[in-house]
Amino acid sequence: MDTSFGSLLRRLRRGRELTLNGLADRVDVTPGYLSMIENGRVNNPPSMKVLVRLEAALAVHDSSLCKAAQWARTPQAIREQLQRAQQASAPQPHCPQDLESFRGDLRGGFRGASVPLINKVAAGYPAGFTDMDYPARASDDAVVVPGYTGLHGGNDPDAFAATVCGDSMTPDYRAGDIVVFSPLADVVDGSDCFARLEPDHESTFKRVFFEDEGSRIRLEPLNLDYPTRTVDREAVAGLFRAVWRMSRL
């Protein structure tokens, strides 16, 4: 395994002022195993169970460890193909400075971005997620998002789009809307998020709130006909904030 995942783990651990022994105790693995990961001396990233425990112990809310592990598992040939495609992408002439400006005026000359369309996300009860474990930036389909150019002065290469099905997020989102989700966008209380849930990789689209110092996550619909659901942080494999919406007329 390359050292990028291990370097990220080391940086997060040191940022939380944890020793290898301290983190190993929280995650129920050996300090030696963590040391080997941090130094890139294991062939594969940790299992999903260990990744979820690591993110909980390190208070990681953006699934950055899970995403890094997914990238590490991606075959080298696919990585090189994706990296070449990214390098060949022309820079965008304008990059909005905040999420709200994504709703800006197209008359300003914004160029659109092609974003992978992975499938559907249920705005209702959790439903099966069918991205077939694509690595970031890969899919069988794409959608051009007028005006979307990325976050905070740069492109957002890992952004993805999904079509809303169900009505639990009405009136803000309707079935058939296409929503772009950004792994780079900070997830805070009240964010509308694509949530990927364990153990069966279910997905749902809800407004999220953190409870009990982040150990519990409340998934709240906007449509009051649907129940609120609260789950342990370990049961959430990923949270990705909605940053753009395309609605039917």
Image: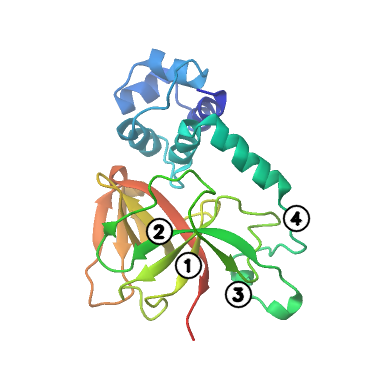
Judging by the rendered image, the residue that carries numbered circle 3 is 103
> Which residue has dot 2 on it?
194
Q: CA distance from mark 2 to mark 4?
A: 27 Å
In percent of the image, x 41 and y 40: which residue is there?
59
Q: Mark 4 or mark 3: which is in front?
A: 4
Element under disc 2: strand
**Image quadrant of residue 78?**
top right
- Determine which residue is flagged by label 1: 179
- Tell which tag, 3 or 1, sits nearer the viewer: 1
**Mark toward the start of the polypeptide (3 vs 1):** 3
- Which badge, 2 or 4, is on the more N-terminal residue? 4
Chain-order first, disc 3 or disc 2? 3
Does 192 appear above or below 135? Answer: below
| Residue extending farthest bottom | 249
Q: CA distance from mark 3 to mark 1?
A: 13 Å
Q: State the CA–CA distance, disc 4 to disc 1.
A: 23 Å
Q: Is residue 21 above or below residue 161?
A: above
Residue 79 image offset from top left, x and y in percent: 57, 36
Q: Amino acid at mark 2?
A: Phe
The residue lying toward the viewer, choosing from 213 and 27, is 27
- Alpha-carbon distance for marks 4 and 3? 20 Å
> What residue sits 69% from the left and 65% below the top?
96
With respect to residue 91, does 74 lie above or below? above
Circle 1 crowding by C-alpha within 10 Å: few under 14, some 14–19, many from 20: many
Identify the amino acid type marked 4.
Pro
Point out the tag, 1 or 2, that comes first from the N-terminus.
1
Q: Are marks 1 and 2 in contact (CB under 8 Å)?
A: yes
**Which residue, as the protein is rendered here, is positioned at the far right?**
93
| Residue 196, label in figure | none
Circle 1: residue type? Val
